[in-house]
Image (cartoon, rainbow, N blue to C red):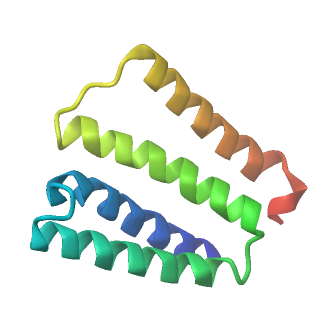
């Protein structure tokens, strides 16, 4: 259940981040409302996950996967481009989350 809470936090963080550009500096009410609601929901689920997962581990997974998924949304939905250094950086983030989850004793 703890990772379900974390997954929900990640999904809502990606939704909030993905709508951020559409707010036009928070001057458009509908996308702004979506961003605010998504982040409130995100932090609620993150707080639930933190009852069971150490802060450093949860935040690394939340932040890392949030970055990767938000970058994917920017490429596939918003049609923005990533250069080679950005792709390498994303791969390193995924590798870090993998190492933390499968080799660290902190996650158990």
For residue 60, above or below residue 91? below
Residue 89 vs residue 37: left or right? right
Residue 80 vs residue 83: left or right? left
Can you say which quadrant of the picture contains the C terminus? bottom right
Image location (x, y in percent) of residue 45: 51, 80
Question: What residue do we see at 17% from left, 41% from top?
Answer: 78
Residue at far top of view: 84
Give 17 or 66, whichever is nearer the viewer.
Answer: 17
The answer, for residue 1, to whether it is visible in the render is: no
The answer, for residue 73, to whether it is visible in the render is: yes
Quadrant of the image occupied by residue 19: bottom left
Quadrant of the image occupied by residue 107: bottom right
Question: What residue do we see at 86% from left, 60% from top?
Answer: 106
Can you say which quadrant of the picture contains the N terminus? bottom right
Residue 68 vs residue 71: left or right? right
Give 12 or 35, whichever is nearer the viewer.
Answer: 35
């Amino acid at each position: 259940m703890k990772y379900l809470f974390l997954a929900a936090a990640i999904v809502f963080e990606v939704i909030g981040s993905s709508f951020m550009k559409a707010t036009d500096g928070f001057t458009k009410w509908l996308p702004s409302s979506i961003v605010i609601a998504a982040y409130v929901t995100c932090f609620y689920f993150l707080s639930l996950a933190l009852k069971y997962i150490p802060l450093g581990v949860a935040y690394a997974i939340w932040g890392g996967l949030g970055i990767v998924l938000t970058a994917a949304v920017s490429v596939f939905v918003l049609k923005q481009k990533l250069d080679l250094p950005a792709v390498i950086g994303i791969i390193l983030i995924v590798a870090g989350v993998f190492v933390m989850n499968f080799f660290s004793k902190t996650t158990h």
